[in-house]
Image (cartoon, rainbow, N blue to C red):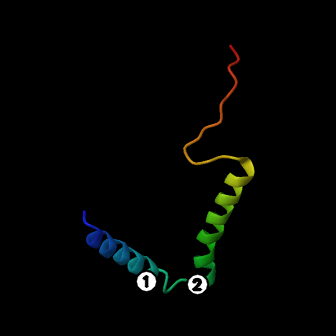
């Protein structure tokens, strides 16, 4: 895919995504924002990164 096509597709996705939020209340818009902030904060506080699993001790 060329750079021009990628830009057009990304712009279209952004416009459609923002248009979908037009009729939402403040609570409806802020809920996913809070969930995202909470997920990032939890990841930072626990030291986890996406795709990384904690090692479990081998008890055998």
Find the residue positioned furthest to the top. 60
Q: Quadrant of residue 34?
A: bottom right
Badge nearest the viewer, 1 or 2: 1
Residue corresponding to mark 1:
19
Instruction: Report the residue at 25% width, 62% height from top.
Output: 1
Residue corresponding to mark 2:
25
Q: Which element is circle 1 on?
A: helix
Q: How many other residues sit within 10 Å of disc 2, few (<14), some (14-19) or many (≥20)?
A: few
Instruction: Report the residue at 37% width, 77% height from top.
Output: 11
| Mark found first going from the N terminus, 1 or 2 | 1
Relative image position of residue 47 (x, y in whole percent): 70, 47
Q: In this view, does 28 lie above or below 3?
A: below
- In the rendered view, does 23 fall on the left or right side of 5? right
- In the rendered view, does 45 fall on the left or right side of 37? right
- In the rendered view, does 53 fall on the left or right side of 14? right
Find the residue positioned furthest to the front. 3
Relative image position of residue 13 (x, y in whole percent): 37, 74
Instruction: Report the residue at 36% width, 72% height from top.
Output: 10
């Amino acid at each position: 895919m060329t750079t021009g096509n990628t830009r057009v597709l990304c712009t279209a996705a952004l416009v459609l995504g923002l248009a979908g939020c037009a009729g939402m209340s403040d609570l409806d818009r802020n809920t996913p924002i809070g969930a995202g902030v909470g997920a990032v904060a939890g990841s930072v506080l626990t030291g986890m990164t996406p795709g990384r699993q904690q090692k479990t001790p081998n008890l055998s």
